[in-house]
Image (cartoon, rainbow, N blue to C red):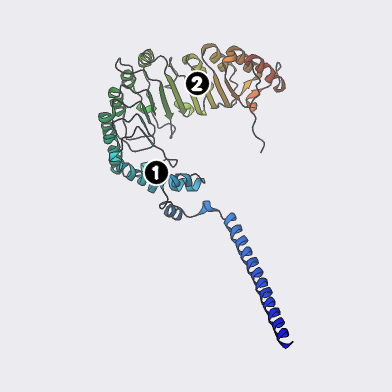
Amino acid sequence: MRGIKCQNRRSRMKRGGRDNDHNSSEEGTAEKSKKMRTTNEHFQTCDWGNLLPDIILHVFKYLPLLDRAHASQVCRSWNQVDSSKESAEAACDILSQLVNCSLKTLGLISTARPSFMDLPKSHFISALTVVFVNSKSLSSLKIDDTPVDDPSLKVLVANNSDTLKLLKMSSCPHVSPAGILCVADQCHGLRELALNYHLLSDELLLALSSEKHVRLEHLRIDVVSENPGQTHFHTIQKSSWDAFIRHSPKVNLVMYFFLYEEEFDPFFRYEIPATHLYFGRSVSKDVLGRVGMTCPRLVELVVCANGLRPLDEELIRIAERCKNLSAIGLGECEVSCSAFVEFVKMCGGRLSQLSIMEEVLIPDQKYSLEQIHWEVSKHLGRVWFPDMMPTW
């Protein structure tokens, strides 16, 4: 009996020990869960976008190139760090190593626009020259906001003149009109060109219009003024535009205007073959009236702002003379409902894109805002409503 009692005591002690272990384990698990919740809450509430740029850049250096590209899309601050001067230097180092790689497409893109411009010019040019020399079949080159210069373009031409079809160069201050002319003179297969207006010249248009040159499909021009009153804009001769359009009758001439009102004087004084016009800043009634008189090939018109003077006459004139117009967008402008209906009636169903803010339309004796969408829809041949500002 004593043996049985002792055995039972030992069994109870064992069970008690296991129970105590179990209770201790539950307490430990609860404590760990609490710590994990606290850590997770801290992790979730931590603003990772406010990490010091040096820390983010240090981590990025250990990531493969593809993972670094994905990480740079997480938030704006990470993107800015990855688009910094250090990132631009890394891009140049990669270019310098492409000695055994024949590229067909090269695009140097930075959301932090000064990054490539902050590099020593010699560093960037030497890296780019490696690509130009070793890529014997480069067909597409996009190098906006970079310190590329005329001598490096000559290297490009010497090695890729037979293959280059697209050249996009905006905001490249070290390139002169002579550098672009060199490209046009030698790259006879060029089909698409994008550059700033200060690089556009009569000589360039005539070179693109020569018999040995293929017909250009797209010419994109940025007309930008950063300092009002301090930028001089030259005038392209009508004869140069005429020669250009005779050689490339189906070309899309796309022009982006970011000018102040007093800087428009050299433009739209005679007929130009523009097909797409985008006005990123306020543009006067006078300029829009001249657009209707001088741009008969116009296909798309976007006006960011005009002011508080109705554009009734200007829209009617554009509808009368621009027989190919198929897309229009109006932002901070004013148009009477009657004039707008007349404009749509004249253009008819060819208006595939009609983006007009509701605030643009001014009710008059003939049409209210409630009535206008029915009348416009009837002339378009589809249901149409003016765009509305979101309320949130």
Q: Nearer the viewer, residue 231 or 387?
A: 387
Circle 2 — which element? helix
Q: Which residue is mark 1?
A: 115
Q: Nearer the viewer, residue 90 or 138?
A: 138
Q: Quadrant of residue 358?
A: top right
Residue 140 position within the rendered picture, expressed as x and y whole percent measured from the top left: 36, 30
Q: Residue furthest bottom?
A: 2
In the image, what residue occupies the spot 69% across and 79% down?
A: 11
Amino acid found under the numbered disc labelled 2: Val
**Pointer 1 local density, CA inside 10 Å: few below 14, some 14–19, many at least 20:** many
Amino acid found under the numbered disc labelled 1: Ser
Q: Nearer the viewer, residue 350 or 290?
A: 350
Q: Is residue 182 left or right of residue 250?
A: left
In the image, what residue occupies the spot 53% across and 24% down?
A: 302
> The N terminus appears in which quarter of the rendering?
bottom right
Q: Which residue is mark 2?
A: 287
Q: Quadrant of residue 105?
A: top left
Q: Is residue 365 left or right of residue 170?
A: right
> Vertically, is 341 above or below 7?
above
Q: Is residue 218 left or right of residue 358?
A: left
Q: Which numbered circle lies on residue 270?
A: none
Circle 1 — which element? loop
